[in-house]
């Protein structure tokens, strides 16, 4: 999160993500995002294979 706060819904799981935090999840679970208490600025990185490429050496 660059600024603001969002509520991230991943199936039954709900996560609040605030500025300065990050969330990593499988793209096999469709996410739903909504701003919480105002606008939010998000940087999203998607891997073409749906893998967590930042975890590989």
Image (cartoon, rainbow, N blue to C red):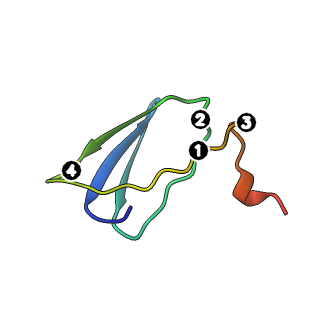
> In this picture, is 54 found above or below 11?
below
Q: Which residue is mark 3?
A: 49
- Which quarter of the figure has residue 28? top right
Residues at marks 3 and 2, CA–CA distance in whole angstroms: 9 Å
Image position, residue 22 (x, y; %): 48, 61
Q: Classify mark 4: residues with Cα within 10 Å, few (<14), some (14-19) or many (20+).
A: some
Q: Residue at x 62, y 39 (%)?
A: 26
Q: Which residue is denoted by mark 2 in the rendering? A: 27
In the depicted view, which residue is nearer to us: 43 or 21?
A: 43
Which residue carries the number 1 mark? 46
For residue 37, the mark is none
Q: Are marks 4 and 1 in contact (CB under 8 Å)?
A: no
| Structural distance between the alpha carbons of marks 4 and 1 | 23 Å
Question: Can you identify the residue that label 4 sits on?
Answer: 36
- Front label number (4 vs 1): 1
At a point 25% along the width and 61% down the height, the residue shown is 4
Q: Residue at x 73, y 52 (%)?
A: 53
**Numbered disc 2: secondary structure:** loop
Dot 3, crowdedness within 10 Å: few (<14), some or many (≥20)?
A: few
Instruction: Answer with mark 3 or mark 2, whichever residue precedes in sequence.
Output: 2
Closest to the observer, 20 or 11? 20
């Amino acid at each position: 999160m660059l600024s603001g706060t969002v509520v991230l819904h991943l199936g039954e799981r709900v996560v609040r993500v605030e500025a300065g935090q990050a969330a990593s999840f499988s793209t096999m679970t469709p996410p739903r995002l909504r701003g919480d208490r105002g606008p939010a600025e998000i940087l999203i990185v998607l891997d073409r294979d749906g893998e967590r490429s930042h975890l590989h050496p």
